[in-house]
Amino acid sequence: MKKLTLKDIDLKGKRLLMRVDYNVPLDENQKVSDDKRIQASLPTIRYAIEQGARIILMSHLGRPKGNIVPEMSLKPVADRLGELLGKKVHFVTDCIGPEAEKGVQDLGDGDILLLENLRFHKEEEANDSDFSKQLAKLGDLYANDAFGSAHRAHASTVGVTDYFDTCLSGFLMEKELNYLGAAVSNPERPYVAILGGAKITDKIPMIENLIEKVDQLLIGGGMAYTFFKAQGKEIGDSMLDEASLDFAGEILKSKGNKIKLPVDCLIANSFDFKLRQIGQTKVVSIDQIPKGWQGLDVGPETIKSFSSVCQNAKTIVWNGPLGVFEIETTAKGTMAIAQVLADVTGKGATTIIGGGDSASAVKKAGLSSKMSHVSTGGGASLEFLQGKELPGVVVLTDA
Ligand code: AMP
């Protein structure tokens, strides 16, 4: 699992072609509205600057699908990165071809160039070998610090590596692999996973993989109701993933001893997510959901029971909110668990937050810095926790 990193190679004067994840939101004035991902790349970039590398950064932004879409230009990112580094970040309007090559030629040691959005070329997502070759021409060395894109076999994450002897991992990539890798292969026990969110279907492979490894699996969120339905309970209008009913029933039968489901829930007699409108609410035991009502959050007894499991754990992986955390009335369970995880981290447990909604929830709770690791890759961390090898990781050179 250990990969060569920037620290293992002399970077001085080398053209370092590095894949980063600058898929950031832009506001109506074409300014970066959340620079978390740019911030996350700074340690690697600062190190490369200090070592005197000539840094060529490449990324995608949005889904331009092979078209030049000015609103998805990376130019605003170059500006923001420059502000954060206190240093000029050069920019070229194409990621391959004469302008990019000239931009690279003009770099001195410690200089930085950001290439325009890779996905302005459809060949990027097609993992096209000629396009990969043209990208590769720009560097002497390749590095990948974009964990969030490592589950996709694209030209900048996979194809390009055919043209380099040594493919390095950046520090962000290294951190992701260390934490997620340890959780997958060598967790300190007791090892607990908490899964929530809406659909089970997407998460079946992860449940199947984690159930074999964890000591306890806590299930909350919308997906819990499919398990209750499989147990023959009345779930009213709660979220039901019909296609996963058989799976839920079978896994409860074969591995039920490891699975802990909610014992109570917050229900509402009407709910409109888009309008953020919620009717009458009450907390009931899981056996008492009336027809016409739906479960939207875990209840206080569940929070107690989940908390006590977490208090004893040494490693906790969390993926998916325990309720509709976007709305305050139904965010309590998710926020409470975020706090518990922050507390146990303080007492020495390792806590790993999968990307996506769980990362947003922890951020909303203001507790991101209190966790051992908050993954930057939603889809990538999901696939990693399923036990899959990520194509963008496999191609990196083993240490
Ligand atoms: P996922 O993408 O599968 O991780 O699902 C995340 C979404 O699940 C979030 O938008 C939550 O609002 C939603 N969610 C969590 N719990 C529930 C629930 N009990 N009922 C409906 N939606 C839920």
Image (cartoon, rainbow, N blue to C red):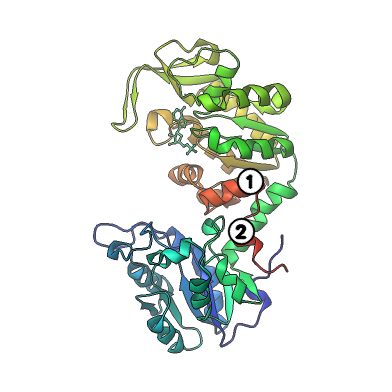
Looking at the picture, tell me which residue is in the foreground, 253 or 7: 253
**Percent from the top left, x then y, of residue 97?**
41, 80
Residue 272 sits above or below residue 22 on the image: above
SS of the residue under disc 1: helix
Q: Amino acid at mark 2?
A: Pro
Q: Are the residues tagged 1 and 2 within 8 Å (C-beta)? A: no
Give the residue at the far left of this rendering.
29
Q: Is residue 57 left or right of residue 307?
A: left
Q: Residues within 10 Å of mark 1 (few under 14, many from 20)?
A: many
Marked residue nearer the N-terminal end (1 or 2)? 1
Q: On residue 85, which mark appears?
A: none
Is the shortest distance between ligand 1 and the CB of mark 2 under 8 Å?
no
Q: Residues within 10 Å of mark 2 (few under 14, many from 20)?
A: some
Looking at the picture, tell me which residue is in the foreground, 308 or 229: 229
Q: Amino acid at mark 1?
A: Leu
**Percent from the top left, x then y, of residue 370?**
55, 49
Residue 254 sits above or below residue 164 on the image: above
Q: Name which residue lies at 68% across and 76% down.
A: 8
Q: Name which residue lies at 34% across and 19% down.
A: 270
Which residue, given by chain and number where applicable, does mark 2 sit on?
A: 391
Q: Quadrant of residue 308?
A: top right
Q: Is residue 261 visible?
A: yes
Residue 151 sits above or below residue 191 on the image: below
Which residue, given by chain and number where applicable, does mark 1 sit on?
A: 385
